Amino acid sequence: MIVFRKATQNDISTIVQMIANDDLGQTRENYQNPLPEKYIEAFKNINADPNQELIVVEDDTSEIIGTLQLSFIQYLTYQGGIRAQIEAVRIKENKRGLGIGEKMFEWAIERSKQKGAHLLQLTTDKKRPEAIRFYEKLGFKASHEGMKLHF
């Protein structure tokens, strides 16, 4: 059994550790103890925004084994629709391959529907072919070309 709940400030270190635990995350994140204050500030901003949900996934021993963030974006197109964006999906390394990712996406899809979203979107780095195959298996389609401008 797994449990989904909103993250608390006490969960931030575990979340950042999961986000930093891959080749790309190691280049972007600064996981250390104590965590840099920027992570605490970011959590406070996310937690204060009703359109943001930072979620942790716990196993039956209450160990955090996964995380994701849902953002709900109101816009004028689609007749004033809401789209859900899923980001920072991570599962602890020793818990991968057990079907937890599928359960996380099932939960995220249902949560997005509850919030009135008409679609759930994500971006993934092209350097993550396994993730791309996983998302395609779940029914996601590469329908647009994403572009970014880093500052």
Image (cartoon, rainbow, N blue to C red):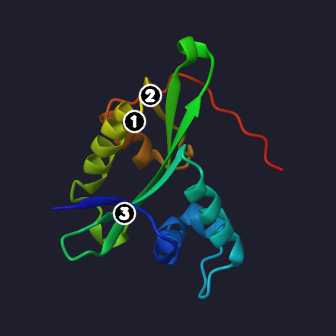
Taking the view exactly as shown, the residue that stands out farthest to the top is: 79
Residue at x 18%, y 71% (from the top left corner): 60
Q: Position of residue 51 (x, y in %)?
A: 55, 43
Residue at x 38%, y 39% (from the top left corner): 135
1 vs 3, front mark = 1
Q: Are the residues flagged by discs 2 and 1 in contact, CB closer than 8 Å?
A: yes
> Tag 1: Cα neighbours inside 10 Å, few (<14), some, or many (≥20)?
many
Is 46 displayed left or right of 67 in the figure? right
Asked whether residue 48 is in view, the answer is yes
Name which residue type carries label 1.
Answer: Ser
**Can you say whether 142 is above or below 108 in the image?**
above
What separation in Å lies between label 2 and label 3 (alpha carbons)?
23 Å
Q: Secondary structure at mark 2?
A: loop
Residue holding disc 3: 66
As drawn, the label of residue 117 is 2
Q: Position of residue 94 (x, y in %)?
A: 30, 72
Q: Nearer the viewer, residue 15 or 41?
A: 41
**Can you say whether 33 is above or below 30 in the image?**
below
What separation in Å lies between label 1 and label 3 (alpha carbons)?
18 Å
> Tag 2: Cα neighbours inside 10 Å, few (<14), some, or many (≥20)?
some
Q: Secondary structure at mark 3?
A: strand
What separation in Å lies between label 2 and label 1 (alpha carbons)?
5 Å
Q: Position of residue 54 (x, y in %)?
A: 48, 56
In the rendered image, the quadrant that contains the N terminus is bottom left
Q: Quadrant of residue 116?
A: top left
